[in-house]
Image (cartoon, rainbow, N blue to C red):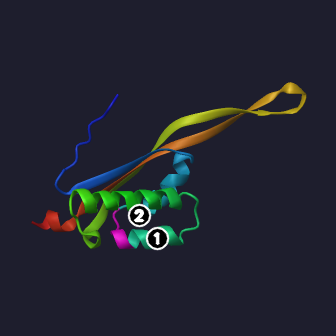
Amino acid sequence: MIKKRRTNHYTEVYAIAQYISMSAHKARRVIDQIRGRSYAETLIILELMPYRACYPILKLVYSATANANHNMRFNEARLIISKAEVNGGKTVKKLKPRAQGRGYPIKRPTCHITIVLKDLDVEEN
């Protein structure tokens, strides 16, 4: 089922990363720190945090900014992260071979990350 996004197409730009190989709980720990902050402040925070979840989120913020710059001609200095959410994805299930022909299940959780950027210049006018 495809859900339509209700965003203001004139002020908001988004990027979605799906099936990131990480649990949603660990990604939310990082997303909660950057929600509502400016673009420059977000980059500094993500580069200095020691978590593994920072790298895919940093790539997603770069992608959303590139979308804003290319598609809508927004200035990077006036962008803020208006919405950032992490949803759980499918769990990848594997079998790890063990002794005497047995197999133990391994569950690798995935998540979907959405970043929505808002331009403050368009908002003021």
User: Farthest front residue?
Assistant: 70
Task: Please provide percent x and percent y for residue 26.
Answer: 55, 53
Task: Please provide percent x and percent y for residue 71.
Answer: 24, 56
**Considering the image in quadrants, where does the C terminus appear?**
bottom left
Residue at image point 33% right, 63% down? 36
Residue at image point 25% right, 70% down? 78
Q: Residue 93's image quarter?
A: top right
The residue tagged 1 is 45
Most foreground residue, 72 or 61: 72
Q: Determine which of the numbered discs, if any, sits on residue 34 in the image.
A: 2
Residue at image point 42% right, 70% down? 43
User: Farthest top residue?
Assistant: 101
Disc 2 packing (10 Å; few <14; some 14–19; many ≥20):
many
Q: Is residue 124 left or right of residue 38?
A: left
- The amino acid type, in three-letter code, at marker 1 is Ile
Q: Do the residues under discs 1 and 2 have CB atoms within 8 angstroms? A: yes
Q: Is residue 86 left or right of residue 101?
A: left
Q: Find the magenta span and give its range.
A: 36-40
Q: Residue 4's image quarter?
A: top left
- Decide which of tag 1 and tag 2 comes sooner along the chain: 2
User: Farthest right residue?
Assistant: 100
Q: Residue 49's image quarter?
A: bottom right
- The amino acid type, in three-letter code, at marker 2 is Ile
How far apart, in angstroms, are the residues tagged by discs 1 and 2?
A: 7 Å
- Is residue 37 magenta-colored? yes
Task: Please provide percent x and percent y for residue 64.
Answer: 34, 57
